[in-house]
Image (cartoon, rainbow, N blue to C red):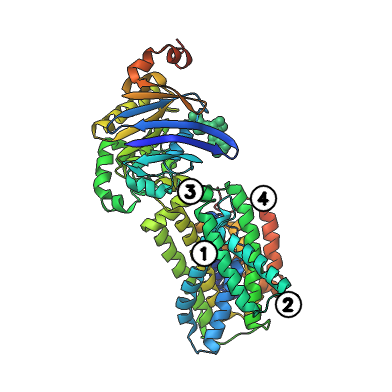
Amino acid sequence: MLQVKNINVFYGRIQVLWDLCLEVKEGEILALVGANGAGKTTLLNTISGIIRPSSGTISFLGRRIDNLPPHEIVQLGISHIPEGRRLFADMSVLENLEMGAYSRGSWKTRQKTLEEVFHLFPRLRERAGQPARTLSGGEQQMLAMGRGLMSKPKLCLIDEPSNGLAPKLVQEVFQIIRSLREQGITILLVEQNVRQTLEIADRACVLENGRIALEGCGEELLKSEHVRKAYLGL
Amino acid sequence: MLTSILDVLIAGLLLGGLYALIAMGLSLQYGVARVFNISHGEFIMLGGMATLTLFTVFKINPLIAIVICGPITFVLGYIIHRTFFRHLLTSLPIFGEITILCTLFLWTVFRILADYNYVRLNQFAALAICLVIAIILDFALNRTAFRRIHESRVAAGVFESTSMLFSFGLMFIIKNIAFIGWGPSIRSYSFLQQPVSIAGALFGMNRLVTLGFSILIGLAFYFFLTRTRIGKAIRAAASDPTVAQLMGVNINQVLALCFGLGAAMAGIAGVLISMCYPVNANMGIEYTIIAIIVVALGGLGSIPGSFIGGFALGIIGSIVSFFEPGLALVAYYFIFGLLLLIRPKGILGK
Ligand SMILES: Nc1ncnc2c1ncn2[C@@H]1O[C@H](COP(=O)(O)OP(=O)(O)O)[C@@H](O)[C@H]1O
Ligand SMILES: [Mg+2]
């Protein structure tokens, strides 16, 4: 579904991603784990068009997207739920969700999508009129995810959704990600929470210093000596 | 005594309406498009001078001039953003800048050659040829060497300073062109000057019209921002431009739209100003300064703040003028200085 081929990404003169290849298959949860600063967020930003690779190609559903601006990439069906929620703080919960459906195609069907999102996150309906900044951390993450779903994506890039949440909420977030996959949405999930992520992922990649260090199905990586030592502290 | 207090307050509201309109425009350009637009007042001047010409030469009613000058200044602002500011947003000199630099370079070379009689060509024809060559070169470079880096954006702080410097240059360009066209003389025309009595005090009809339009535009703009799809995109872009793009917002278009709308508000303010006060090609800078003070008073980037700040400054100006007409601008500077010391965030700033 999504093919990333040999991309190199720089911030100024500093290279962050090195000749990186990655494939996301339709209908799966692909987890991307790795230490802080490994380049996970940079990879997602490159896919969604915020940063441009200096070489290499990215294609989605057979179409090259590495030279498209972000707003056109969303229209093709990729939704990026950014690290740190990044809500529009002074806009209401409802307006944040509406912004998620900003693209022409999804704008027309936004009422129907809104009902689906409210069904998934009932708390958001209760809080619809409040400014986003008044929500609790958990609710903010729900809103960020709901907003990302408003564009009716085929592929969701989710960056550290469990960061800063209480264990119970973390469970809930992973539950929701699983249910998205059951609805047919393909997911590229970036996480620091390695154990739980590998448990729900179909496949996983370990990113180290801008390169893919390991790749395999979730269970395989859970058993791998390297992952156990470096990421699970065993 | 009571009537004169009322007089002063109403006069302050009348003045404040104009200030509010001017400041909302600047606030939109700074708060969303991140251009601290020093040339803001020049768009006011263009609106004012154009209305004067339309009225005196073509006998066009100044109220109709609003629907002419508004769209024209909008388009002008939009194009300026899509060309010049758009390129300051990216890290390399690209389309536009290369054209200008190459044209100047080629034309200079031509003139040197012409001085020594190596070529014989009308210099305007030569300028046209240089321009065509430069555009082709620019286009070719964009399609090849700069293609990938085209969209990589400079840091927000870098853009804020380069765009401010550019707008400073733009101020001189617009002002000088206006000087060539209109000359330096101060002119006015009379329109709707019949007095209207409010609470015992007399005010010109034209000034009431001014206030009416300012409030109308303020309200219309408020509904545009809160109720429409594009309006919400503007607010989202003001809050987080990167994430707005992830939602599907074409950020370059929205930024140019904001700059254009800001310019249109300035243009319309210029039309309204010309109904009440004399205008000349040199008037822009004074209004730029007032706009900056109001925007600082209301809170940098806060559009409701600018609206309220405009009326606040208008009333202050009117009170000071009541005692000593020459001191209004001095009072504005004094408030500006005081504000920076006591509450740099302004009334509604965060
Ligand atoms: N805007 C930026 N400018 C310069 N360097 C950056 C920028 N963003 C991230 N980096 C650097 O790139 C590397 C990868 O960062 P990031 O992609 O955020 O990693 P991760 O998401 O895996 O924690 C880090 O070394 C970080 O310091
Ligand atoms: Mg990250």
* Mark number displayed over residue B262: 1
* Mark number displayed over residue B117: 2
CA distance for labels 3 and 1:
18 Å
Q: Secondary structure at mark 2?
A: loop
Q: Earlier in the sequence, mark 1 or mark 2?
A: 2
CA distance for labels 4 and 3:
31 Å
- Front position in the image: B77 or B129: B129
What amino acid is labelled 4 in the image?
Answer: Ile
Q: Earlier in the sequence, mark 2 or mark 3?
A: 2
- Residue at image x 56%, y 34%? A15
Q: Secondary structure at mark 1?
A: helix
Relative vertical location of residue B208 with respect to residue A2 in this rendering, above or below = below
Q: Earlier in the sequence, mark 4 or mark 3?
A: 3
- Residue B219: % across, % down: 43, 65
CA distance for labels 2 and 4:
66 Å
* Image-based side of B293 in relation to B27, left or right: right
